[in-house]
Amino acid sequence: MFPVAIPGTFERTALAPAPDTRPALRYHGVFASAAMNFRHLRYFVAIVDHGSMVKASDSLFVAQSALSQHMRNLEAELGVQLLLRTGRGVVPTEAGQDFLQRARAILAQVEEAQRALREQSATPQGNVTLGAPPSVSAMLAVPLILRMQQALPKVALRVAEGMSGYVLDWLQAGVVDLGLVYGAQRAPGIVTTELYTERLYLIAPPGTQMGETLNFADIDGLPLILPGRQHGLRDMIDRLARERRITLNIPVELDAMSQMKLLVRHGVGCTILPLAAVRDEVERGELRAVPIVDPDINRTIYVAMASDRPQTPAVAATVRILEACVQRLMTPDGVPRSP
């Protein structure tokens, strides 16, 4: 079987000279030549199938003179005679019979590749890996997976949790196909599209005495449990504190949201998270969530992809379902909708 160059790829293959020098085998190296193309193969097969230049010309909608010229060029390129003109029509020579089998096999492979690509485009399929910070994954992962199982049964979704800085690293390394990151964090070679904006709350131990809202200035001196500086949330809070000349008291740095919440429950300190990340604990009375005001603190989450990798139909379909999930789960002002 000869190597086939599928559109979008190119492979130059060097074939060793065949030990058999019969005329039917003299053309083996030609498939690496730029002069050979699938049109030549289709024309040749059509002529043999119809047994006539005239009938082949009619079926191909190609002028007979042009068709004859293509065959002369093909035979000159191969260095063998492929067709024999007789009083009863056109028949393949011995070399032509050998070439016909190979041409049919190659055209069948090309047709199968085209069919597979069309099916993949029409019905997204394959694997998609999504990287997301834990606070975002807490709200989106389960609804997204459930919706994709219904709408995209041939797409296998994997969700990898990690701080937003790690998600960017995964994108650049090709570990994930999509990432959910915060607006404050950008990286070379990454393109982003806004997904949604969410409001942030002070998360305190149950029974903490404070008002219905909390001015950002009143965070001054509170013991805070926050992620490390590579995290987008920490970067936002640090910048705002510098602008407001507020001193942050951070006795514990922890890059694990579940453990941050557990430490808050044990009274070690407070943290800052979106309401979606603690909704269950707040409803059970295990934590208290107080909106931060003056200023309101909001953060924007973006869908991020590597600019040097093509977007597959499966990835594109995942993004559309992700956007639909956000519209269903979040209000326009960044607050989770009631279940």
Image (cartoon, rainbow, N blue to C red):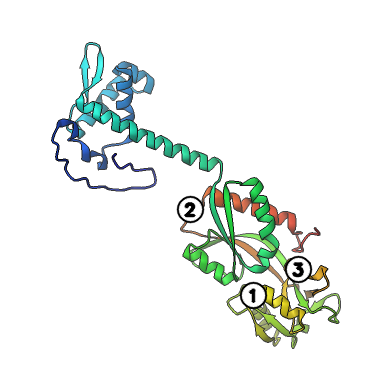
Q: CA distance from mark 2 to mark 3?
A: 35 Å
Res 144 quadrant in image: bottom right
Reading the image, the residue beneath label 1 is 256
The residue at the far top in this view is 87
Residue 56, position as x, y percentages in the image: 33, 20
Q: CA distance from mark 3 to mark 1?
A: 17 Å
Residue 58 seen: yes
- Horizontal relation, residue 179 to residue 54: left or right: right
Q: Nearer the viewer, residue 300 or 286?
A: 286
Reading the image, the residue beneath label 2 is 310
**Which residue does the image show at 80% across and 58% down from the upper left?**
339
The residue at the far front in this view is 19
Q: How many marks?
A: 3
Looking at the image, is 140 positioned above or below residue 218? above
Q: Nearer the viewer, residue 150 or 35?
A: 150
Reading the image, the residue beneath label 3 is 275
